[in-house]
Amino acid sequence: MYDFIGIYQEMIYFGVFGVVGITMIVQSKFWNKNKRNIGDMLLGIAVVIACLYTVIQDTRAIQNENICIYEGKAWESWHRGYTFMGAEGDKRKLEIWGPAWNKLCEEQIEKGKRYRVYYEEETEIIVKIQEIK
């Protein structure tokens, strides 16, 4: 069974950004022609559109469940995930979001160990990790 909490967490984060975008649109006073701030209004609209696009993509990813498997060594960690190196030397950056870390990683991921990583293809968010022994 795959754990999509990382994708849900990303949707929540971008939902909050969407609320910030709506706030920017309201603060731009778009209804008052004399006091309208076009820059804030356009930035707010751009933020809302980007957030809607991301949330729609994530919703589609959860509904379609296009899970890929990648086997490789843990190469390096970065602020939102890990880079894994495959057998042919190709590297792939995959993400782990927020509370998904504790659910997916029973043990600390160690550099140099081999792992089988299950991730959603479109978002590249990890949904399951297994150590290969």
Image (cartoon, rainbow, N blue to C red):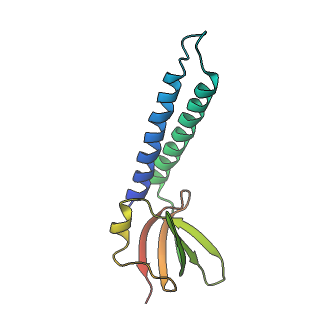
Locate residue 85 relative to residue 5 in the image: left or right.
right
User: Which residue appears at 45% of the width and 85% of the height?
Assistant: 132
- Of residues 22 and 11, the one drawn nearer to the viewer in this rendering: 22
Q: Is residue 86 above or below residue 46?
A: below
Q: Is residue 42 above or below residue 107?
A: above
Q: Position of residue 92 (x, y in %)?
A: 60, 71
User: Which residue appears at 41% of the width and 69% of the height?
Assistant: 128
Which quadrant of the view contains residue 32?
top right
Which quadrant of the view contains residue 122?
bottom right
**Res. 1 in view:** no
Report the quarter where the N terminus lies: bottom left
- Of residues 13 and 86, the one drawn nearer to the viewer in this rendering: 13
Q: Give the total of numbered labels.
A: 0
Q: Position of residue 65 (x, y in %)?
A: 46, 58
- Of residues 69 and 73, the one drawn nearer to the viewer in this rendering: 73
- In the rendered image, the residue lying farthest to the front is 35
Q: Position of residue 52 (x, y in %)?
A: 52, 38
Locate residue 3 relative to residue 55 in the image: left or right.
left
Report the quarter where the C terminus lies: bottom left
**Res. 100 in view:** yes
Q: Is residue 121 above or below residue 118?
A: above
Q: Is residue 37 above or below residue 9?
A: above
User: Which residue appears at 60% of the width and 21% of the height?
Assistant: 37
- Of residues 105 and 86, the one drawn nearer to the viewer in this rendering: 105
User: Which residue appears at 53% of the width and 47% of the height?
Assistant: 57
